[in-house]
């Protein structure tokens, strides 16, 4: 094994040497055989990976430096992954698509020494050399080496002549070096740590840049991007489109970046094009309303998120051009609301006017939040009355008899209760919000199986369930302060910060895109989980909104 202090010192020496700076070299008295992988990136394609060895870190690092210097012109500015082999597992025999006992994200794989075939944990993940079922994918190894135009391709094809091959797993201590310094990596991302105010703000800017780049001239987003194959999924969801626009406008509120606003307005235009005249039900005499249509249906959440996006645009630009449209969208929402406040229709077939049985736990909270935001624009009390009635139904009927374990972690309801309480300070709204916040806090992973799960939810965790809870808790934090519950505020804020510490491990940054086909496309986006690299706009939206809320609290 290689020590933490010694490996960092060697990484610092490699970085400084490549930049022409003077720094103390690794300990010359270390004579233990060492192996070092360097991932040399130009930011345009997958990194070139080289392997060097030597007796002791000083000799291995010097050998690695010579390899890096020979390729320096091809990879400036400095983007360097540095991986010290820390542990090597026993020999295993594997078929072309056989089971490999390994931990994806932590383990690399190496074949017999004479083959020169060894792949870092990041390469294994980025190219699915071992899939989620821990099956070896020999065809992906060959494809990867073809993309790299590597002479090892012929070797890879030849090692299966006997039907199976001997391999070992190995673990590394990983670092990333650039002009700014050296950072410790875990699973290819920055090691979990308490993020600073500056780190959170820079992450938010990178997230906004990803969304800006994802808007086409038509106003449609790249909805789902798969970095492993550099392709887009052929699917779409207009609700998530509206949510992504909302988060972009939240960021614009702080940056006043004209490019970001232009992209958000393109996307807002696309959203507006999906809106059509409709009735709350199949009653032709009903007042004409507006519906966000997709695949022949309107959804309560679609209308709500469209209002939220348009209301945010009105707030940050001063434009009231969409006010009538927002009011007609709200008219449909209140038209499907019963006298007791319940939204009785969540999904409606537009042509027939028939209600679908589908029910979403999140649509009512989205609707309440949208109605309060619309009231803040036009002052019409009917929207606020509808929001209050809806909140009372959720609290006093839907959630009243549920145990804490059964209670939905409804982040949109927390947003809505925070906004509603500022206009109508009812104790029932505050109490329910604080109950929700407590239940979410109690579900957070604080002593998990793997250190980089800390701050998350579920096992294994994903980025978006954590991000939505961070959003909801941040709204609850703001409510606790405005309602005079400062006794609850510190614990809520700590849960938000821990959640975002976890989330940022899933943001693609220069160190985590080293081995991807098209590194620049993924930068700033948030992937689904620690081992699933899909980027979808709602993953990005929710992380951006939570980052902005925490950034706002830390600045204040």
Image: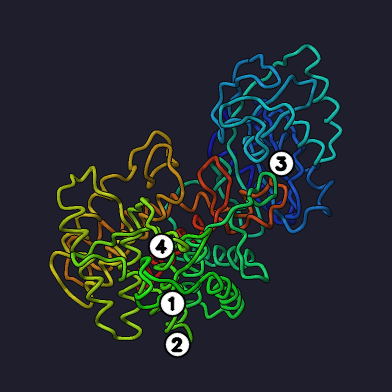
The reply to whether dot 1 and dot 4 touch (C-beta < 8 Å) is no
For image coordinates 82% across by 37% down, the residue present is 146
Report helix, strand or loop for mark 2.
loop
Pick whichever of labels 4 and 2 is earlier in the sequence: 2
Pick whichever of labels 1 and 4 is earlier in the sequence: 1
Q: Which residue is mark 2?
A: 320
- Could you tell me how far apart the alpha carbons at marks 1 and 4 are, in whole angstroms? 30 Å
Q: Choose mark 4 or mark 3, whichever is in front.
A: 4
Image spot of residue 322 (x, y percent):
47, 82
Q: Choose mark 4 or mark 2, whichever is in front.
A: 4
The reply to whether dot 1 and dot 2 touch (C-beta < 8 Å) is no
Q: Which residue is mark 4?
A: 353
Q: Is residue 389 left or right of residue 360?
A: left
Q: Which residue is mark 1?
A: 312
For image coordinates 84% across by 54% down, the residue present is 73
- Could you tell me how far apart the alpha carbons at marks 3 and 1 are, in whole angstroms? 46 Å
Q: Which residue is mark 3?
A: 38
- Could you tell me how far apart the alpha carbons at marks 4 and 3 are, in whole angstroms? 61 Å
How many numbered dots are placed on residues in this image? 4
């Amino acid at each position: 094994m290689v020590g933490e202090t010694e490996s960092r010192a060697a990484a610092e020496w490699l970085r400084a040497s490549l930049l022409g700076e003077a720094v103390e070299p690794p300990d010359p008295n270390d004579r233990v055989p060492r192996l070092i992988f360097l991932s040399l990136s130009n930011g345009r394609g997958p990194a070139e990976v080289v392997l060097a060895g030597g007796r002791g870190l000083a000799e291995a690092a010097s050998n690695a430096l010579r390899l890096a210097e020979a390729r320096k012109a091809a990879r400036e500015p400095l983007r360097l992954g540095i991986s010290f082999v820390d542990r090597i597992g026993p020999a295993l025999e594997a078929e072309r698509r056989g089971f490999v006992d390994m931990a994806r994200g932590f383990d690399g794989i190496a074949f017999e020494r004479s083959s020169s075939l060894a792949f870092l944990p990041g390469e294994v993940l980025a190219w699915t050399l071992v899939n989620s079922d821990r099956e070896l994918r020999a065809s992906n190894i060959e494809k990867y080496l073809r993309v790299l135009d590597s002479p090892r391709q012929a070797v890879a094809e030849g090692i299966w002549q006997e039907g199976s091959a001997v391999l070992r797993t190995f673990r590394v201590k990983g670092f990333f070096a650039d002009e700014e310094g050296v950072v410790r990596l875990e699973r290819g991302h920055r090691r979990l740590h308490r993020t600073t105010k500056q780190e959170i703000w820079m992450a938010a800017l990178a997230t906004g840049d990803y969304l800006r780049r994802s808007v086409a001239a038509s106003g449609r987003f790249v909805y789902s991007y798969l970095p492993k194959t550099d392709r887009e999924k052929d699917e779409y969801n207009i609700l998530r489109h509206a949510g992504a626009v909302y988060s972009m406008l939240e960021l614009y509120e702080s940056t006043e970046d004209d490019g970001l606003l232009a992209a958000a307005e393109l996307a807002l235009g696309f959203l507006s094009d999906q809106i059509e005249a409709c009735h709350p039900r199949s009653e032709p005499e009903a007042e004409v309303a507006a519906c966000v249509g997709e695949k022949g249906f309107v959804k309560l959440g679609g209308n709500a998120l469209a209002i939220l996006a348009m209301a945010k645009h009105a707030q940050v630009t001063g434009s009231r051009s969409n006010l009538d449209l927002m009011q007609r969208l709200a008219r449909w929402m209140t038209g499907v609301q019963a006298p007791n406040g319940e939204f009785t229709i969540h999904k409606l077939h537009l042509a027939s006017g028939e209600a679908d049985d589908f029910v979403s736990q999140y649509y009512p909270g989205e609707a309440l939040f949208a109605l309060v935001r619309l009231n803040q624009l036009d002052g019409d009390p009917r929207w606020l009355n509808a929001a209050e009635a809806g909140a009372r139904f959720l609290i006093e009927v839907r959630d009243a008899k549920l145990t804490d374990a059964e209670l939905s972690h409804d982040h949109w309801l927390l947003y809505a209760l925070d906004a509603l309480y500022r206009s109508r300070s009812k104790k029932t709204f505050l109490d329910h919000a604080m109950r929700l916040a407590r239940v979410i806090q109690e579900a957070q992973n604080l002593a998990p199986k793997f250190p980089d799960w800390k701050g998350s939810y579920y096992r294994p965790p994903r980025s978006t369930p954590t991000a939505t809870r961070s959003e909801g808790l941040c709204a609850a934090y703001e409510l606790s302060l405005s309602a005079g519950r400062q006794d609850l505020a510190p614990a809520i804020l700590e849960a938000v910060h821990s959640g975002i510490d976890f989330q940022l491990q899933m943001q693609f940054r220069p160190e985590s895109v080293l081995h991807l086909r098209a590194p620049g496309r993924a930068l700033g986006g948030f992937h689904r989980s620690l081992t699933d690299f899909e980027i979808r706009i709602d993953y990005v939206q929710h992380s951006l909104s939570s980052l902005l809320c925490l950034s706002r609290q830390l600045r204040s």
